[in-house]
Amino acid sequence: MATIEIEHFSDVLCVWAYFSEPRLAEVARNFGATVAVTYRFVSVFGDVPGKIAANWAAKGGYDGFAEHALQSAAQFPELRVSAKIWREVRPASSLSPHLYLKAIELCERAGQCPQGSFAKATGGMRHAFFGDGHDVARAEVQQAVGSSAGAPAAAVLPYIEDGRAHAALAADYKAAETLGIAGSPTLVLNHGRQKLYGNVGYRIIEANIQELLRDPKPDDASWC
């Protein structure tokens, strides 16, 4: 049976990407090795002060945005959301945690960090902010998350110092632009033909995977 490949584009500071984690875990439980998820990043919170000023100035600023996130969290009681996010803890940018995570990914590919450390650290970075209320834009928080995932800073930092992590992150952002990714989270299936964006329920994700597992002919997805 063919493996269904899914690209998961997200911003680590996007609360809806945090809420999508149980759905991806359910995909892993139900489909196992039949589905391979590749985690990639898109810049939604690259400039947090600018985003808040542009989109939330008339709606309470950071406090209004925090209230929106906490109200949204009521739909997902299985996930802990700290009352400190955006009120007391305000990461300036998602770019630096994205960069550190790409460095962990490269470290894993080189065999210098254990298999699964990148995915574990990506989830850990979201939980550090949304669950524990830590500023993940800070280097010491990133390094602590990486170490908890089995990726020590001594093995990870060289990929930032020589620019390789920057190149990998730039490739993610470019891919998001090329694919027309509208925001976070977005699941991309079937070589870009199918995109599931935002607060998409598990059954919709499952239906898309099941249809691909039906093994349609290539022409089924494109008639002209």
Image: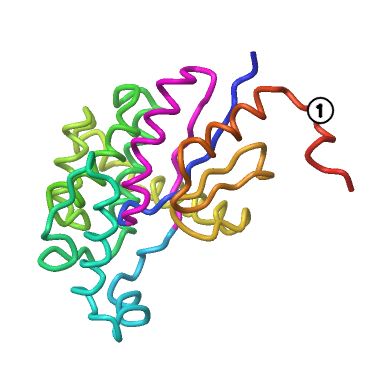
Q: Position of residue 22 (x, y in %)?
A: 34, 35
Q: Position of residue 180 (x, y in %)?
A: 61, 58
Of residues 90 and 214, the one nearer the viewer is: 214
Residue at 42%, 60% in the rendered image:
43
Residue at 87%, 44% in the rendered image:
223
Q: Disc 1 residue type?
A: Lys
In the image, residue 199 above or below residue 44? above
Dominant SS type (magenta): helix
Colouring of the image: rainbow
In screen coordinates, is 29 left or right of 172? left
Residue at 62%, 53% in the rendered image:
179
What secondary structure is found at the residue carrying circle 1? Answer: loop
Residue bearing the label numbered 1: 217
Residues rendered magenta in the picture: 14-42
Question: Toward which corner of the image does residue 216 lie, by quadrant?
Answer: top right
Quadrant where the N terminus lies?
A: top right
Residue at 30%, 29% in the rendered image:
117
In screen coordinates, is 33 left or right of 119? right
Question: Toward which corner of the image does residue 149 lie, by quadrant?
Answer: top left
- The extreme bottom residue here reads 58
